[in-house]
């Protein structure tokens, strides 16, 4: 009985390490792990597979949440340090490019208007 408990504990530990180390288990690897859990743990293969699927789903969700929290924490730290994010820099670069374009249009407009005015004046046609 103690050997079965130890085997089950080892299998569960392997499941945890496999899920943490490679959150994206392939179906083939998950099936092999389910077979091993079923053989050593005294449970049916479909129960073991369901346990693996639930655990990996839970760990994937946790990994996403931890990533989001880490990102939010880093963004807050960047702002405290006076740094900007890549998205903010890209937005500012776009705004500067738009302003430069508008300025070029405004600068070229008076000379075009002046040329048109001179060409239309009665003195220019003599």
Image: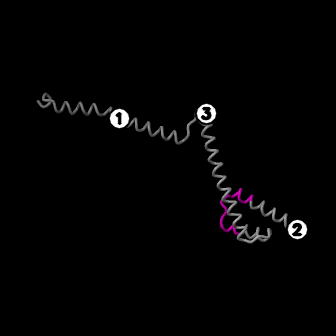
Residue identified by numbered label 2: 1
Which residue is at a point 69% across and 66% down the rendered structure image?
50
Q: Position of residue 25 (x, y in %)?
A: 67, 62
| Disc nearest the viewer among 1 and 2 | 2
Task: Give the distance between the C-alpha atoms of the residues marked 1 and 2, in whole angstroms.
Answer: 84 Å
Q: Residue furthest right?
A: 2
Whether 126 is among the magenta residues is no
First in sequence: mark 1 vs mark 2:
2
Q: Residue furthest top?
A: 123
Residue identified by numbered label 3: 80
Q: Residues within 10 Å of mark 2 (few under 14, many from 20)?
A: few
Residue identified by numbered label 1: 104
First in sequence: mark 3 vs mark 2:
2
Residues rendered magenta in the picture: 16-31
Residue 24's tag is: none
- Quadrant housing residue 69: top right
Is residue 113 left or right of 59 when viewed as pictured? left
Whether 28 is among the magenta residues is yes
Is residue 107 left or right of 57 when viewed as pictured? left
Q: Position of residue 37 (x, y in %)?
A: 76, 67
- Quadrant housing residue 21: bottom right
């Amino acid at each position: 009985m103690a050997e079965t408990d130890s085997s089950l504990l080892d299998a569960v530990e392997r499941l945890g390490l496999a899920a943490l180390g490679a959150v994206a288990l392939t179906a083939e690897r998950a099936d092999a792990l389910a077979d091993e859990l079923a053989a050593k743990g005294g449970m049916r293969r479909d129960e073991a597979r369901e346990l693996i699927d639930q655990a990996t789903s839970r760990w994937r969700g946790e990994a996403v949440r931890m990533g989001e929290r880490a990102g939010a924490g880093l963004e807050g730290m960047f702002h405290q340090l006076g740094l900007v994010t890549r998205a903010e820099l890209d937005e500012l670069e776009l705004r500067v490019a738009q302003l430069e374009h508008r300025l070029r249009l405004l600068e070229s407009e008076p000379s075009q208007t002046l040329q048109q005015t001179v060409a239309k004046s009665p003195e220019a046609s003599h």
